[in-house]
Amino acid sequence: MKLIAGNSNRRLSEAISKRLATSLAHADIRTFKDGEVFVEIQENVRGEDVFVIQSTSNPANNNLMELLITIDALTRASASRVTAVIPYFGYARQDRKAGPRTPISAKLVANLITTAGADRVLTVDLHAGQIQGFFDIPTDNLYAVKEFENRVREIYNGELEDLTVVSPDVGGVVRARALSKRIDQRPLAIVDKRREGPGKSEVMNIIGEVKNRHCLIFDDIVDSGGTLCNAAQALMDKGAKSVAACVTHGVLSDNAAARVMKADALTRLIISDSIEAPEDVANCPKIEEVSIATLLAEAIRRIANEESVSSLFE
């Protein structure tokens, strides 16, 4: 087994390799001055089971091209199997035709990864589960809910009876219910919102009892942070004791960290390290990080050993 790290999230790749007690394979992945990506695998991979770790986060297109070209290089170097480990799968929100003459970019990206030569895909908390069906190769979609459960129990130690798990929209109810089930079947609430455009939403109603309760919003992606902050304010307006949030993928673009910091209604935002945090996110007192390195390392170990990974989906 060999691990190769792209440039999108070197810190997570190193944490995974440490947990697997193996070093990252030597590879030169760089961008020329004209923007072209160049990849050179600097050790023998013939007949090896290779895992390429690369989130397709900002800059999404650069990181995607790094992933595709690395897979191609490994295929041409006669690797026996190439697994694309994509902690954050970019373009996942473009999983359907949202309007006339619009693309289904998630399907296009799936085709590109398959065509590049990947034999299987390993990812975490896809925005929509049906994206697994866009791939014509085995695809494992892991869930980070267990990593968040541990931190939630630490934060609300002694106050779990007053905790309500909140889905930020109707589509996220299944995800929120999974966390609720793990932390002693806590009650659920749903934010009924109207989305007027990308990153713009208006809270219409709160479904469920939140008055005098600690509310924990659970979602898969936080981008600009505007929707999250609006939901937190709406919950406080309905009488919530406090509002915190757990979000797997902290995209946090467009000064989102500053927006979260200024939101009085939101006390805490917990994200995973699926995306390497830029300086403003890492230095924000309200934002903390839990690691999914152990989850991914165990999945990689099981895939390499041809063992079942189904228990990791729970």
Image (tube, rainbow, N blue to C red):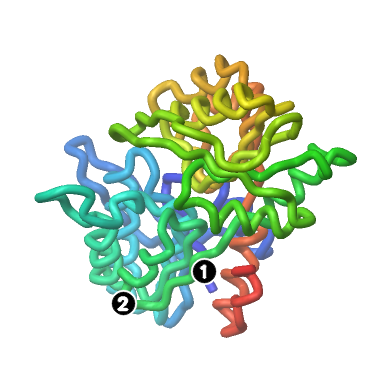
| Secondary-structure class at tag 1 | strand
In this figure, which residue is indicated by the disc labeled 2? 136
Q: Residues under labels 1 and 2: Cα distance?
A: 24 Å
* Quadrant in which residue 268 is drawn: top right
Percent x, y of residue 169: 47, 44
Q: Which residue is painted at 21% across and 40% down in the image?
A: 35
Instruction: Pick whichever, 4 or 227, lies toward us.
Output: 227
Q: Which residue is painted at 76% across and 54% down in the image?
A: 183
Instruction: Tell me which amino acid carries mark 1.
Output: Lys
Q: Is residue 106 left or right of residue 81?
A: left
Percent x, y of residue 299: 59, 69
Q: Quadrant of the C terminus?
A: bottom right
Res 46 seen here: no
Q: Quadrant of the N terminus?
A: bottom right
Q: Is residue 219 left or right of residue 119?
A: right
In this figure, which residue is indicated by the disc labeled 1? 2
Q: Is residue 165 left or right of residue 249?
A: right
